[in-house]
Amino acid sequence: MADMADKSRASTGNDGFTADERAAMKERAAELRAQAKRAKGAAKAEAELNDLLEAIAKLPDESDRALATTLHEVIMAAAPQLAPRTWYGMPAYALDGKVLCFVQPASKFDTRYTTLGFNDTAQLDDGAMWPASFAVTKVGAAEKKAITELVSRAIG
């Protein structure tokens, strides 16, 4: 297992990107091509939601799928105005066309835990330093409450 993780993390070219990072960039390019071809409005929103659900369903690890599904449900319940979509092949949630937060499954980059991350558009500012990503290993009642508060605060 460690050999596989080392292989996916090792740079395979002169550009310094790992194989996993290259794959994520290719996924993002495909997402942008698909978005450009889509109609506007409800059809686009439905297609992007389907892309997100398909990305979750394709996760190779069952616990990643379950966690990503739960996070999706909690995020959408907390902020139904967010637009679900994929971003670099990961579940993401946009506000006014910009990705506000995303779920990086552990299997995406062979990491130890799933991450709930927030981009700079999130209104999480708290002094001179604040967390912008959170490790998530399970989602119980306390985590649902914390995620709901974070997403609500991020929207502003």
Image (spheres, helix red, strand yellow):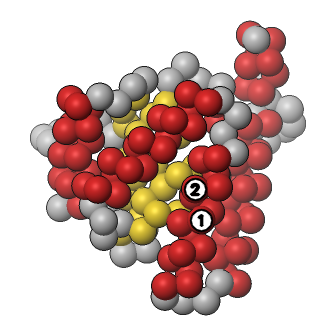
Question: Few, some or many C-alpha atoms within 10 Å of disc 1 (few <14, some 14-19, many ≥20)?
Answer: some
> Please, which residue is most extreme toward the right here?
13
Question: Few, some or many C-alpha atoms within 10 Å of disc 2 (few <14, some 14-19, many ≥20)?
Answer: some
Q: Say above or below: 145 vs 6.
A: below
Q: Say above or below: 143 vs 41.
A: above
> Please, which residue is most extreme toward the left here?
127
Q: Say above or below: 27 vs 114.
A: below
Q: Position of residue 64 (x, y in %)?
A: 56, 32
Q: Is residue 129 visible?
A: no
Q: In which quadrant will I find the C terminus?
A: bottom left
Which residue is denoted by mark 1 in the rendering? Answer: 50
In this view of the protein, which residue sits in the foreground, 7 or 107?
A: 107
Q: Position of residue 24 (x, y in %)?
A: 70, 48
The disc labelled 2 sits on which kind of residue?
A: Leu
Residue 23 appears left or right of 105: right
The circle drawn on residue 53 is 2
> Please, which residue is most extreme toward the top here?
2
The disc labelled 1 sits on which kind of residue?
A: Asn
Q: Position of residue 73 (x, y in %)?
A: 38, 50
**Residue at position x 57%, y 37% from top?**
65
Residue contact at pointers 1 and 2, CB within 8 angstroms: yes
**Residue at position x 26%, y 38% from top?**
144
Where residue 95 sits, quadrant-wise, is bottom left
Mark 1 secondary-structure assignment: helix
Real-space CA distance between mark 1 and mark 2, rounded to the nearest whole angstrom: 5 Å
In this view of the protein, which residue sits in the foreground, 134 or 137?
A: 137
Mark 2 secondary-structure assignment: helix
